[in-house]
Image (cartoon, rainbow, N blue to C red):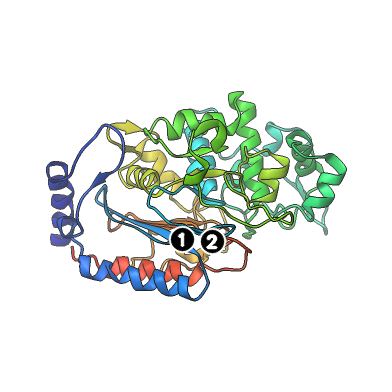
């Protein structure tokens, strides 16, 4: 009780001690927010070792506590090919699957709280051709529900078996054909709600539901009702159309066969080649300070700087593991828990309430509601050759941040 009282006091005092603006993240010091800055400084050696080992070319790390950014630092290089460019804290990263939570999930939960979509709705309510799971022994047909998509318990295939073959058959920029493919040809691997199979196709299906209900593309909806609503200046899908960000501020990802690198174009093949950057599974670009605002809002029951994107009970529902799913699922709505992996949460944080998400490119966010803390890691392990790793780095930094908390 004493510790929680001090934490709430620190959060209150920061309103006067930190610089406050209508938009953007407030800044503070670790000490003012009950953290040991000397321990946080250990992040330096951890990230630098990962760079020296060739796991990543560079990174930006941010730590949020009590609604303020208490640690923000750039490491290494933004680019190493075709030319070396030093990393800066302003750098935008391709968030990859972190897009699933900050883009698709936040947008979709708004529809749920507005009564436009129900978690128990079968997907076929929106798309009549969407096929159910069929019991191979009894022939019983079980509908896949919206809840199953959000918790990766639908049983849909993880990804397209071969994007190149798909493009040869249907062409690029073919979202309508992809929807039909998911409805009728994608595998249904188990009874919905009984197991977990992480699937990009789940969140692409959620995208298509959102677009049918709202009449807007996901990229437009998320921009208006999530990113702009929070006052974010450097978060968007399709940067050339929305962020108005110089290409030099965006971290490149993978080198292509022709010698070019992807820069400002989403790395994920489905999102880039089939959905033209507007995709439920990937496609959001952002930087550390904008992500800090999102994290601060979620740790503050859905609002920050007087700007609300979700109601308190909606945030609570989103972070809750559905009791109707089998224990083997153990996922919240759009967010992983410690118990579902990928075990990048470190060894110190209280585990029960931890929520987070990782991205294939090397990005991650971790939320600890118990301690009012968030950890943001923006790395691009896929640059230039898609042969790096960020898993150990994520876990190590999480442990350092947790151990720095004094009250």
Near mark 1 (Cα within 10 A), the count class, few <14, some 14-19 or many ≥20, is some
Indicate the quadrant where residue 124 lies.
top right
The residue sitting at 81% across, 42% down in the picture is 184
- Which residue sits at x=55%, y=57%? 83
Query: Residue at 56% across / 51% down in the picture?
Result: 96
Residue closest to the eye, 244 or 107? 244
On-image quarter of the N terminus: bottom left
**Measured Cα–Cα span from mark 1 to mark 2:** 7 Å
Is residue 284 left or right of 292 when viewed as pictured?
right
Q: Quadrant of the C terminus?
A: bottom left
Residue 113 position within the rendered picture, expressed as x and y whole percent measured from the top left: 46, 32
**Residue 240 image offset from top left, x and y in percent:** 56, 35
108 lies above or below 203: above
Evaluate whether residue 251 shows in this view.
yes
Give how far across and how far down residue 119 sits, in percent. 56, 39
Choose between 41 and 17: the one closer to the eye.
41
Q: Position of residue 237 (x, y in %)?
A: 55, 38
Q: Which mark is residue 321?
A: none
Pointers 1 and 2 in contact (CB under 8 A)?
yes
How busy is the neighbourhood of tag 2: few (under 14 within 10 Å), some, or many (20 plus)? some
Q: Residue furthest front?
A: 83
Residue 77 disc label: 1
Compared with 126, 29 (above or below) is below
* Residue holding disc 2: 80
């Amino acid at each position: 009780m004493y510790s929680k009282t001090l934490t709430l006091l620190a959060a209150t005092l920061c309103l006067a001690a930190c610089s406050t603006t209508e938009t953007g993240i407030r800044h503070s010091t670790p000490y003012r927010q009950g953290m040991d800055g000397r321990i946080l400084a250990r992040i330096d050696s951890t990230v630098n070792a990962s760079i020296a080992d060739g796991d990543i070319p560079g990174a930006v790390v941010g730590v949020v506590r009590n609604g303020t950014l208490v640690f923000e630092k750039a490491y290494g290089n933004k680019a190493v090919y075709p030319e070396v460019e030093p990393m800066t804290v302003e750098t935008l990263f391709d968030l990859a699957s972190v897009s699933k939570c900050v883009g698709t999930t936040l947008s979709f939960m708004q529809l749920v709280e507005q009564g436009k979509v129900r978690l128990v709705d079968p997907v076929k309510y929106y798309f009549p051709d969407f096929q159910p799971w069929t019991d191979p022994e009894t022939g019983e047909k079980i509908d896949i529900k919206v809840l199953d998509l959000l918790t990766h318990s639908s049983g849909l295939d993880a990804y397209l078996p071969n994007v190149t073959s798909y493009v040869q058959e249907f062409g690029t920029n073919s979202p309508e054909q992809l929807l039909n493919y998911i409805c009728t040809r994608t595998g249904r691997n188990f009874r919905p709600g009984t197991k977990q199979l992480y699937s990009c196709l789940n969140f692409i299906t959620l995208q298509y539901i959102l677009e049918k209900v709202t009449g807007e593309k996901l990229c437009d909806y998320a921009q208006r009702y999530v990113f702009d609503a929070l006052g974010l200046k450097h978060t968007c899908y399709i940067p050339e159309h929305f962020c108005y960000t110089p290409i030099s501020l965006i971290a490149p990802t993978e080198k292509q066969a022709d010698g070019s690198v992807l820069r400002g174009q989403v790395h994920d093949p489905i999102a880039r080649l089939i959905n033209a950057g507007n995709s439920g599974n990937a496609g959001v670009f952002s930087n550390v300070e904008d992500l800090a605002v999102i994290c601060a809002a979620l740790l503050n029951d859905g609002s920050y700087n007087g700007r609300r994107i979700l109601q308190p009970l909606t945030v609570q529902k989103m972070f809750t593991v559905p009791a109707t799913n089998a224990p083997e699922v153990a996922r919240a709505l759009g967010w992983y828990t410690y118990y579902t992996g990928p075990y990048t949460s470190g060894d110190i944080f209280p585990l029960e309430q931890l929520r987070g998400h990782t991205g294939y490119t090397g990005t991650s966010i971790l939320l600890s509601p118990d301690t009012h803390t968030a950890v943001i890691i923006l790395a691009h392990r896929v640059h230039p050759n898609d042969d790096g790793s960020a898993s150990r780095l994520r876990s190590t930094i999480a442990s350092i941040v947790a151990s720095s908390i004094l009250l």
